[in-house]
Structures are given as structure tokens and as C-alpha cells.
Image (cartoon, rainbow, N blue to C red):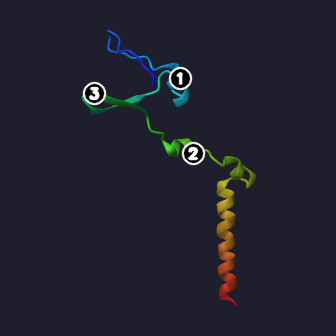
Amino acid sequence: MLKTRLSSKNQIVIPKEAREKTKLQSGNNLFVHVIDQDHIMLSKEPVDHVKALEGLGKEVWQALGGADKYIKEERASWDRKSLWTQHS
């Protein structure tokens, strides 16, 4: 367990070991959860998963000529398949 002290300005310093393990950086938002009269819990701001995944796999789309081109080609192939099955 790590120990810190509440300053006269009601501030605390999060020990270096805790900051490193949680990858906290200056400016990060923290949430204070009051458990009961003797316990509080700090937590990091939840990750915005949509934002974290933004751009993932963009190199795949670039290799395919862009998403618009790929979608148009894919839709065209559906049309060809449906025409083929109608004439069978």
C-alpha cells in the first residue's frame, strides 16, 4: 500500500509508483468515488473506445484503393451474382 498526505490546500500527490503503473500523466482527469466515511477510490477517466479505435485498419482500405472504391466494386459484384442466379 502506498501512502500520501493531504496538504493544507486539500491536495494530494499520487506516488510515482502508482502513476507509472496506471500510466497517469499531468492533466489526466480523475474521478473520486466516495465509498464510505473512511474510504475513497480514485479512478481514471474511462476510455472512449470509439475514439481509441478511430483509424484502425486504414492501411487496409488504402491498399484496396479506398473504402468508396471497394464498396462500389463489392456492390457491383452483388448485382452480377443476382443476374447470374436469375438466368440459371
Judging by the rendered image, the residue that carries numbered circle 2 is 53
Farthest top residue?
8
Q: How many circles with numbers are drawn on the protein? A: 3
- Find numbered disc 2 in the image and state the secondary structure of the residue it sits on: helix
Splitting the image into 4 quarters, where does residue 9 fall?
top left
Where's the C terminus, which quadrant?
bottom right
Residue 86 x/y as whole percent: 65, 87
Find disc 1 in the rendering and name its residue.
17
68 on left or right of 26: right
| Residue depicted at 45% across the width and 20% down the height | 14
- For the view shown, which residue lies furthest in the left direction? 37
Could you tell which of marks 2 and 3 lies nearer the N-terminus?
3
| Residue under numbered circle 3 | 38
Q: Residues within 10 Å of mark 1 (few under 14, many from 20)?
A: few
Considering only order in the chain, which callout, 3 or 1, is on the residue closer to the N terminus?
Answer: 1
Q: Residue at x 48, y 39 (%)?
A: 47
Question: Which of the marked residues, 2 or 1, is nearer the chain's N terminus?
Answer: 1
Q: Dot 3: within a 10 Å radius of its alpha carbon, few (fewer than 14), some, or many (20 or more) residues?
A: few
> At which x and y percent is residue 30?
41, 29
Q: Is 3 placed left or right of 51 in the picture?
A: left
- For badge 2, the amino acid type reads Leu
Quarter of the image for residue 3 reads top left
Q: Nearer the viewer, residue 15 or 58?
A: 15
Residue at 69% x, 77% y is 80
The image shows residue 19, relative to residue 84, as above or below, that is above
